Image (spheres, helix red, strand yellow):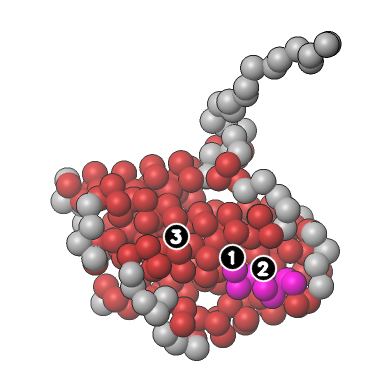
Amino acid sequence: MKAEFLRLIDILGTCTFAISGVFAAMQKRLDLFGILIIAFITAIGGGTLRDLLIGDLPVSWMRSINTPLIILASAVSAILFRNVIHNFQQTLFIFDSLGLGFFTVLGLQKGITFGLHPLICIALGTITGCFGGVIRDILLNNIPMIFRKEIYATACILGGIIYFLLLEFNFNKNWLDVVVMILIFIFRFVVVKYNLELPAMYGDKKEPDKH
């Protein structure tokens, strides 16, 4: 039952991140091939890095043709229904936030399966949730959200901390994954709605040398 639920999370996360990749690419007016490439990278980037770090090879999406087919189907569906969407930025935010919750929990579970320390599991959850978007933004010549003032990776870290705290207090394991995914989505929604940001760091401004 647990394995089936994690597979469902994987499918939902793959779909949502593929769709977010499509809308991010369409904002940059890429051609069809470029859109599909960005969709694939957004969906598999974080999981690929996670699997490489823990030595779980071949990486998960290479073990079955189902994952590439799910990404392709999600991307094509998003492209076909693009005219129904009136606000690409809002749609990108929703699907990106959903994918963040799904993949963070998936990364946490992968770390737990490998018997890793909770802090390492939280790091893996953050990598799984964030780094597909990081690679996507770099390829689209954007500063990745994880490196900006906008709270992004913090949502994953907070979700991971809450996960292990609830686990420590014997929270119902059947609902634990769902609760953490919802909390990550809500946290991300709230910080964007109320424009909450981490402080930016600036270097000292030096006077130009007049000599």
Mark carried by residue 71: none
Mark carried by residue 128: 3
Identify residue type, mark 3: Thr
Q: Marks 2 and 3: in contact by CB < 8 Å?
A: no
In this rendered view, identify the residue nearer to me: 84 or 151.
151
In this rendered view, identify the residue nearer to me: 193 or 64.
64
On screen, residue 165 above or below 207:
below
Secondary structure at badge 1 equals helix
35 is within the stretch colored magenta: yes
Identify residue type, mark 2: Ile
Task: Give the labeled residue for mark 2.
Answer: 38
Label 1: few (<14), some (14–19) or many (≥20) C-alpha neighbours in 10 Å = many
* Image-based side of 141 in relation to 163, left or right: right
Name the residue located 80 percent from the left edge and 67 percent from the top edge.
30
First in sequence: mark 1 or mark 3? 1
Mark-to-mark CA distance, 1 and 3: 11 Å
Q: Quadrant of the C terminus?
A: top right
* Image-based side of 188 in relation to 118, left or right: right
Toward which corner of the image does residue 70 lie, by quadrant?
Answer: bottom right
Whether residue 103 is visible: no
Question: For the magenta stretch, what is the residue range?
Answer: 34-41
Q: Position of residue 118 (x, y in %)?
A: 25, 50
Toward which corner of the image does residue 51 lie, by quadrant?
Answer: bottom left
Q: Marks 3 and 1: in contact by CB < 8 Å?
A: no
Toward which corner of the image does residue 86 lie, by quadrant?
Answer: bottom right
In terms of secondary structure, what is the magenta stretch mainly? helix
Whether residue 117 is visible: yes
Mark carried by residue 42: 1
